Image (tube, grey):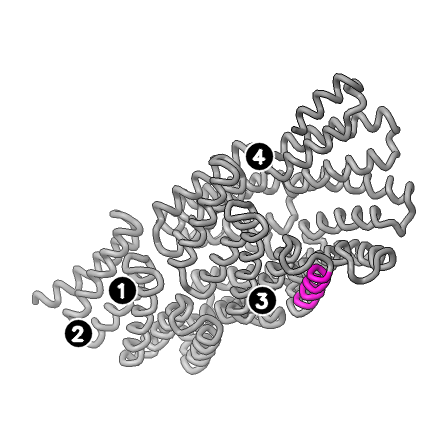
Amino acid sequence: MLKKALDINVRVYGENNVATNYTDLGHLARVQGDLVYAREMFVKARDINVQIYGEKSQHVAADYADIGRVAREQHQVRYAKEMFEKALAIHVKVYGESNPIVAQRYTDVGRLARDQGQYDYAKKMFEKALEIDIAVYGQNNQNVAFNLTDIGRLAMCQGCLEFAKDMFERALKVNIEVYGEYNQHVAVAYRDVGLVAMDQWRLDYAQNVFRKAHRICVQVYGEYNRHVVTCYVDLGRVERAQGRIVKAKELFERALSVAIRVYGEDDRNVAEAQRNVGDVARVLGQFKLAKEMFAKALDIDVRVYGEHHQKVAIAYRECGLVANDQGKLWEALEMFEKGLAIIQGVDGADSQTVAAFCNDVGRAARDQGLWEHAAEMFEKARSIHMEANGETSHTFAVTCMEVGRLHHFQGNLEDAKTMLEKAVTAFNALRKNNNATFASQFLAVVLSEQGKFEEAKRLCEKALYVHKKTCGDKHSRVGTTYHNFGLVFAKEGDTKSAKKMLERALAIRTESMGDDHYEVADTYESLGDVFLRTGEFRKAEAAYSQALNGRLKCFGEGHEFVLQARSKLYEAKSIVTA
């Protein structure tokens, strides 16, 4: 219909009087995910409006804003910034500082700044927009709800979860008052409330809120709609966080099925859905499926965005993660470095995203014993995070944890302890209790190797308490904590307690991840080590046999982990035979 309207208007008015038609086509293409066509339409509209109204008109400013939004979604940061700043300058000159259209421009600039990790500047822009909209409309207006949502999402980026919660709940209240309960804006507001609840690890509450959003979206749009896809993804993420990985996979597969029906096979949104399926397949040890999903997503992203795009870099990263899981460490490093090269070209050398990719390259290099390369990557990530946010950011804490693990691999136990303690302190300051607990388990292993068994056991006990309280008794994280606790007891020489912890770990890991997962194989191997020390040689042989079978399925013949398991099985068999 819009193309027919364009054809008619071109015939009636001529090519230079159809800017509005091009704008309408651009908005439709943007909603449908065809960003290249959307941008082409917005540029055509701008060129016509410049010819008719001149460079400094409000119509041209609106076109700049449209082009900027598309460029932002294409992750072309510099161009988006240029467009938004042009739009803002024109609209301030045309309308003055206190106009709602100017508030929209401040919002555009703020969102881009938030994407780049420029949080203080983003906050300044969002607060200006909020101040204008409240002055014009009062407190209970949809634009005010949008402003509150933007400030809340920024607060989440900064780790200020209570403040984010307050902003989202205020936005939800305004949206319900403006639209009523069954409206798409209310569904989005419920989703934001659910997302911050997830970050606060209030998982049951998050699940209930996401279910409300899902009911609203199905009632408003029907089952086959892009908003419903998002609802299934959110519900899947809650299930995953609660340790119900198989249920999460079912929901992500449902999201993928709906996305294909809504968008077609080759759409960017389908690629996102494939990533989610691939992600849980990795957790379940289903590496073949994970690799298939990530490869399909990579293929779509290259065709949609071109090779040099942030989405393509992320797809390379995901392929690298699967390769790493499969023990194909050189392939993993190659994928991570491809992603890093792309992201440096897109976002610049010092962006937060570059730092995240540096951490990936550093991990892969560390796992191969390439210590100098790993140290170089981690230091680059650390310096970027320090420059952007100081020592109080989540990303800085993650990098400290990785550097600590590198020192542990190198046998530098005191340096490892220092960095891991710094990571735990930073996570605690951000109230990221689960992240702090995760880092503390690595710290516990280091302490046990220093002979500080009581301190190591206290950290493991605290980790068990936190993970049981937040995730439930049968979560995979609880299984991992029992496993690490077992290793600490084994190092201390308390084989009875080690056996007890590892058997609990095995039961939880088998139930949550399946018999063939590589972490289940790790626990079997650790149990075999304990049985060998206690003289239970047939039990050791059986445990090593299970470890070997699991690793063969995960990594394939010839991998060093398989060779290690086979060697231990051979040792146990030799003792039993003798």
Which residue position holds label 4? 305
Marked residue nearer the N-terminal end (3 or 2): 3
Work out whether residue 55 can be spotted: yes
Which residue position holds label 3? 197
The mark closer to the camera, 4 or 2, is 4
Count all numbered tags in the image, as a single digit.
4
Marked residue nearer the N-terminal end (3 or 4): 3
Which residue position holds label 2? 536
For the point 47% across and 54% down, the residue is 363
Q: Are marks 4 and 2 in contact (CB under 8 Å)?
A: no
The circle drawn on residue 525 is 1
Q: Quadrant of the C terminus?
A: bottom left
Specify the amino acid type for callout 2.
Glu
Q: Where residue 212 appears, x then y in whole percent?
A: 56, 61
Q: Secondary structure at mark 2?
A: loop
The circle drawn on residue 287 is none
Dot 2, how many residues are within 10 Å of its Cα: few (below 14), some (14-19), or many (20+)? some
Q: Are marks 3 and 4 in contact (CB under 8 Å)?
A: no
Specify the amino acid type for callout 4.
Tyr
Dot 4, how many residues are within 10 Å of its Cα: few (below 14), some (14-19), or many (20+)? some
Asked if residue 82 is among those painted magenta in the image, a careful observer would answer: no
